[in-house]
Amino acid sequence: MSYALHPPSIAARDLSQPVLREREYLRGMAEVASVLGAQFARVLQDFATDANSQGLSQDTKGSLCERCRGAAASGAAVSTRAQEAAMLQFLGQLLRGLDDFAASRTPESRGSQERARRDASLEVRTRKWGVYTPYDGQGPLQFGHRGEEVRALQRLLNSLGANLEEDGLFGPKTEAALAALQESAGLSASGIVDQKTQQVLDAGQTRIRPEMLDRHPPKYGDYGAPLPSKGAAPFGRISSKDEFRKVALEAGLPESWANSDAAYWLMMKESGGRVGAVNYTYGSRAKDPSQWASVHNELRSGRISAKSSATGLFQHLSSNANKYYPSGTRGIGNAHEEMIGGYRYVMQRYGSPERAKAFHMSHNWY
């Protein structure tokens, strides 16, 4: 499939006057931007279904297509040299990115490099955000995947000596149990279901040696450690603007949000910066952070035992957590997911944190 683009030519005009020359130049740039943006949208829509583009996630494809539609829609708004430069840069980046992507999809360049990028993405998404990706049958089953294949793996591991919750999520405990089995069988403890590991699982003859479980404890990410049942508050707190910025950028959010005084104000007003904070309508449970995890589990199961189901940095109802958090209500108590949810909610409903703050100040909610 060809991904060639065809920039339109700008019709000849009388550009003898300086004012006309500037105005017509910008109008021509608007035409180019609009037409190219529309072409990008069509081209990317085509490669979204191209067999050669299956290595790119649907989320990434959708995001690129939306950006292209935005370029097409905003082409007519190019009215200053700064906007023109920004549009040129944007279109140039998309052109280069599309060329690089098309080149990377040749048969010769597929394989280990593409798998390494995909596996690294799985690692980051799950270690840092607690987001699990549906297993699509491509490549080995490994950390970060979710689905019935993972549940079947957990069932097999339990039959061989593990003690896993069969939840279909290939998390740190499943990874550790698999590594323990691999070492028990004399294999490299990679924590990945490669061909030799699958043969061991299918045979069902090798049991996990208890000492191997001790040698392979679960490896948790920044926000993925198990919650203590007693003692100190199990959830962190963002207590300064610098910490807010750090968590926002770690979550992959724009600089404009990370640096926003209004966004920081909203968070502090709603939760005081307490990750996983439970709404005051839960009474004594809201005042005791050691009880928050039980409230979160209720909400994940669909049970609401107080007047409001709001939780987290921006006090989102469980329905909004399902809508805006990367992994739905599973993301409650995860600083990155709560930050991402706050950004998505505010931008979709108000367009900017400043507008959301203004509404909050006049209504005492948002």
Image (cartoon, rainbow, N blue to C red):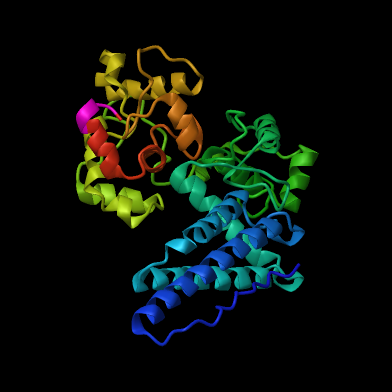
Q: Is residue 273 visible?
A: no
Percent position (x, y) of residue 303? 47, 15
Answer with the quarter of the image where residue 81 lies. bottom left
Q: Along the line of sight, which residue is nearer the eye, 55 or 139? A: 55
Does the magenta portion include 353?
Answer: no
Answer with the quarter of the image where residue 8 lies. bottom right
Q: In the shown orientation, is residue 77 left or right of residue 230?
A: right
Q: Which residues are magenta?
A: 361-365
Answer with the quarter of the image where residue 111 lies. bottom right
Residue at left 60%, top 46%? 179
Name the quadrant of the N terminus: bottom right
Q: In the shown orientation, is residue 315 left or right of residue 111?
A: left
Residue at left 79%, top 40%? 202
Residue at left 67%, top 43%? 135
Name the quadrant of the C terminus: top left
* Total residue callouts: 0
Percent position (x, y) of residue 332? 41, 32
Most common secondary structure along the magenta stretch: helix
Is 295 located above or below residue 25 in the figure?
above
Does the magenta portion include 363?
Answer: yes
Q: Is residue 275 visible?
A: yes
